[in-house]
């Protein structure tokens, strides 16, 4: 739920980084915090345990500059990855404008990824949000690790595509973030499907962090255009 | 559901009316500062002494505070807590729910009392609820908000991150 304030000429949008525990959500925010100019971002707030596990959320406001006389400000949130913090995860999703799912590419984390993805769908549905109809991107993190799953396996498990039944949308649509690939396409079985845009990342070095943020920000602003 | 469906916006006239209500409250209660925070953590308005802290961080934590307390209320069999009070040695804050969408925060010190703030905030909550319900009703009735406002935004994002 973006907030447009005509008096102070501000547009505020909320982006939530979701995903399994220890997947790199907080690391994404820390990298953005470190790289964005200090005058375009606020404080990085972490409600974490003593062992630096996110307890409630991390929060970072980032200004994207002025557009049409309006200051655009993105509020970036992470949720706790650990399953037993589901109550706080769900609270953070309230009023969300865009979602980044940060998946852990390691083979042994596949099940945790799937569980977190299912939990995201469930929590969104409880608010009445349809994840397939809102800005949503997936980031495959930790691509540098030797035990990282092949991209095709991750896509198959986490981003197999949702069916499109609306005939007007059943046309091949290019992936704006990956030249030569498609977000909407027809399967050999005749079924039309759409996938979420995805990015490969190594959040600890910053690879892919801004590609992901840029993509989700664009998608969010497009919904307001 | 389209994503924008939950969005809301208010005009300069709304802002003027809301600010006036808050100023009246500050005058009557002798509180230092009043802030309005959206339930999703966005700061809506600040009236009175400008706070020395980061208001964006404050707004986020306020919304989280209220959300966490809502869950606590449910655990003990209540629907919600429509007001919260945090007492400090010198500075205290009183938080009240407005129309289930916005939180009014009053910051006050020992120049006034909790009793007076609580008494005066009651009418303010009533008035703000009426004002915000009008804002939400107008949006729900489908009045357009800034069509095409953000056309061209992609270039600006590219510039920032490029």
Image (cartoon, rainbow, N blue to C red):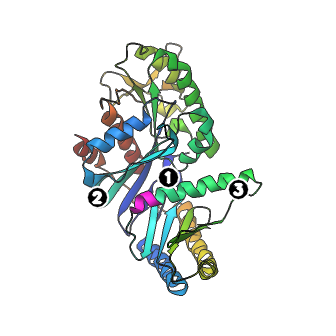
Chain bearing tag 3 is: B
Which residue matches tag 2? A68
Q: Quadrant of the C terminus of chain B?
A: top left
| Image mark for residue B73 | 3
- Residue extending furthest bottom? B28
Q: Quadrant of residue A200?
A: top left
In the rendering, at what x and y percent does residue B25 appear? 53, 82
Q: Would residue B57 be counted in the magenta stretch?
A: yes
**Which span of residues is magenta-colored?**
B54-58
Which residue matches tag 1? A1
Front-most of residues B94 and A174:
B94
Chain bearing tag 2 is: A
Front-most of residues A199 and B48:
B48
Task: Tell me whether circle 3 and circle 2 mark residues in contact (CB < 8 Å).
Answer: no
Q: Quadrant of the N terminus of chain B?
A: top right
**Which secondary structure is most common in the magenta stretch?**
helix
- SS at mark 3 in the image: helix
- SS at mark 2 in the image: loop
Chain bearing tag 1 is: A
| Residue drawn at 47 percent across, 29 percent down | A22
**Is disc 1 in the same subunit as disc 3?**
no
| Residue drawn at 26 percent across, 55 percent down | A39
Mark yes or no: residue B41 visible: no
- SS at mark 1 in the image: loop
Q: Nearer the viewer, mark 3 or mark 2?
A: 3
Q: Nearer the viewer, mark 1 or mark 2?
A: 1
Label 2 Cα neighbours within 10 Å, binned few <14 / some 14-19 / many ≥20:
few
């Amino acid at each position: 739920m973006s907030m447009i304030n005509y008096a102070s000429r501000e547009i505020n949008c909320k982006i939530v980084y979701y995903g399994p525990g220890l997947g790199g959500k907080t690391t994404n925010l820390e990298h953005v915090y470190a790289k964005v100019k200090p005058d375009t971002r606020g404080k990085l707030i972490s409600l974490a345990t003593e062992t630096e596990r996110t307890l409630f959320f991390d929060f970072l406001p980032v200004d994207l500059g002025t557009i049409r006389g309006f200051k655009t400000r993105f509020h970036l949130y992470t949720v706790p990855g650990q399953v037993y913090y589901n109550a706080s995860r769900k609270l953070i999703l309230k009023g969300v404008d865009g979602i980044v799912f940060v998946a852990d590419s390691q083979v042994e984390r596949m099940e945790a990824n799937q569980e977190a993805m299912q939990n995201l769908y469930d929590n969104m549905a409880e608010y009445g949000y349809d994840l397939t109809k809102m800005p949503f991107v997936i980031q495959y993190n930790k691509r540098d690790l030797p035990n990282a799953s092949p991209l095709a396996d991750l896509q198959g498990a986490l981003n197999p595509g949702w069916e499109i039944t609306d005939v007007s949308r059943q046309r091949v649509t290019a992936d704006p973030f990956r030249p030569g690939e498609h977000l909407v396409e027809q399967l050999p079985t005749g079924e039309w499907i759409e996938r979420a845009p995805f990015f490969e990342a190594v959040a600890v070095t910053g690879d892919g962090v801004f590609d992901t943020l840029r993509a989700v920000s664009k998608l969010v602003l497009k919904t307001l255009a | 559901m389209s994503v924008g469906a939950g969005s809301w916006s208010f005009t300069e006239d709304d802002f003027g009316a809301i600010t006036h209500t808050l100023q009246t409250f500050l005058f009557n209660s002798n509180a230092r500062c009043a802030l309005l925070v959206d339930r999703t953590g966005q700061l809506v308005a600040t009236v009175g002494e400008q706070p020395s802290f980061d208001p964006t961080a404050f707004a986020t934590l306020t919304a989280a505070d209220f959300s966490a307390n809502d869950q606590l209320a449910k655990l003990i069999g209540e629907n919600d807590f429509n007001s919260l009070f945090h007492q400090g040695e010198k500075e205290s804050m009183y938080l009240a729910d407005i129309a289930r969408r916005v939180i009014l925060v009053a910051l006050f010190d020992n120049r006034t009392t909790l009793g007076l703030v609580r008494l005066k905030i009651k009418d303010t909550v009533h008035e703000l609820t009426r004002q915000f319900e009008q804002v939400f009703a107008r949006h729900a009735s489908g009045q357009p908000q800034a069509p095409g406002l953000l056309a061209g935004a992609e270039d600006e994002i590219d510039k920032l991150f490029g």
